[in-house]
Image (cartoon, rainbow, N blue to C red):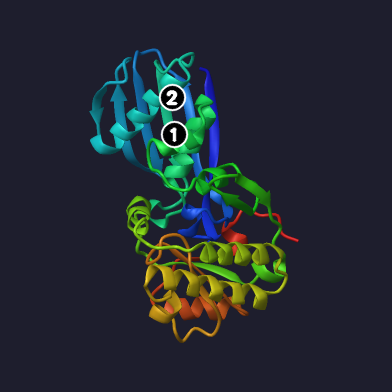
């Protein structure tokens, strides 16, 4: 039986959240967890689809040869997939979307905000040959940095206009002091993007973020990195009119903490000098899901 397989990496944005939507650059990393797609031919007409998170099948549906929904475990999610398949059919009419069985396997928790949607878009693009940014624009929206991360090999700088600008090698003098901690309050990216549209952002604030990112890409000491984290947090705090996550939740933490992605949920980036001490601090605060940089990031370090 003919089978094709594709894979896409999850993501985290370290600097540039929100402002990337207004034209600033962002600094992001691909993860060593993600999503995989296998496509097999089947004898019966129509399309069979199953999406798994580990052993759990969280979406299953059947389509007719005309991509009409026959049955589904979640009609809303299935309808979005059907919409994307029809866009693919329109963009690449030579591709036959019939007699196919799709299986999608996710190897991270969907609540983590690591890029369930972006890895999915990337997988469909890799299989079909249709531009992933076109598929993103017609579905979830956003800056597209997560689409770039899905096929990236290491840390990179991105902008909406230029897409992937360049790859970055972060030294171990920085990466050996970074911990990603899950706050347990997943944010809905589309909702946060919509809310941000009403915020005023000046060109000087965009320039400031670009300067922070430029310095971050050439930083060699954790103390330098921490100063940039503070600058970024203060900048976004002034725009969003909300306190920084350190001020709000972790004011007694001895090192620095920065929000990642949509503020208020998902993961934070914390620096440390002793990993065990940092882990103990967050466990005592009730946060027991965390990863060191080396554990979760797909990165070539110096």
User: In this rendering, does residue 120 appear at all?
Assistant: yes
Horizontal side of residue 66 vs 252, given as left or right: left
Q: Which residue is mark 2?
A: 88
Residue 50 image point, x, y percent: 37, 33
Quadrant in which residue 176 is drawn: bottom right
Say which mark, if any, is on residue 173. Answer: none
Q: CA distance from mark 2 to mark 1?
A: 8 Å
Residue 276 image point, x, y percent: 56, 78
* Cβ atoms at labels 2 and 1 below 8 Å apart: yes
Q: Quadrant of the C terminus?
A: bottom right
Residue 189 image point, x, y percent: 38, 53
- How many neighbours does mark 2 have within 10 angstroms: few (below 14), some (14-19), or many (20 or more)? many
Q: Nearer the viewer, residue 51 or 112?
A: 112
Q: Residue at x 45, y 66 (%)?
A: 289
Q: Which residue is mark 1?
A: 135
**Of marks 2 and 1, which one's residue comes earlier in the chain?**
2
């Amino acid at each position: 039986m003919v089978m094709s397989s594709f894979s896409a990496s999850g993501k985290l944005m370290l600097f540039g959240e929100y402002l990337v939507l207004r034209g600033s650059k962002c600094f992001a990393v691909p993860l060593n967890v993600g999503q995989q797609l296998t496509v097999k031919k089947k004898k019966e007409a129509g399309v069979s689809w199953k999406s798994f998170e580990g052993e759990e099948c969280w979406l299953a549906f059947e389509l007719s040869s005309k991509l009409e929904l026959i049955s589904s475990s979640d009609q809303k999610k299935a309808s979005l997939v059907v919409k994307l398949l029809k866009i693919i059919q329109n963009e690449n009419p030579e591709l036959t979307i019939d007699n196919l069985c799709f299986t999608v396997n996710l190897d991270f928790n969907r609540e983590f905000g690591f890029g369930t949607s972006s890895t999915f878009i990337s997988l469909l693009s890799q299989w079909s040959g249709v531009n992933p940014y076109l598929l993103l624009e017609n579905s979830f929206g956003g800056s597209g940095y997560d689409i770039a991360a899905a096929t990236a090999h290491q840390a990179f700088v991105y902008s909406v206009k230029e897409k992937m600008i360049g790859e970055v090698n972060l030294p171990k003098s920085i990466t050996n002091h970074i911990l990603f901690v899950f706050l347990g309050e997943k944010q809905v990216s589309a909702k946060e993007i919509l809310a941000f549209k009403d915020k005023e952002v000046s060109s000087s604030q965009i320039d400031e973020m670009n300067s922070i990112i430029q310095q971050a890409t050439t930083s060699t000491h954790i103390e330098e990195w921490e100063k940039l984290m503070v600058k970024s947090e203060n900048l976004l705090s002034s725009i969003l009119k909300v306190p920084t996550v350190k001020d709000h939740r972790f004011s007694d933490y001895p090192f620095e903490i920065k929000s990642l992605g949509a503020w208020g949920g998902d993961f934070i980036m914390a620096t440390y000098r002793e990993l065990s001490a940092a882990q103990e601090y967050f466990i005592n605060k009730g946060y027991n899901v965390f990863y060191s940089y080396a554990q979760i990031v797909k990165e070539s370090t110096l």
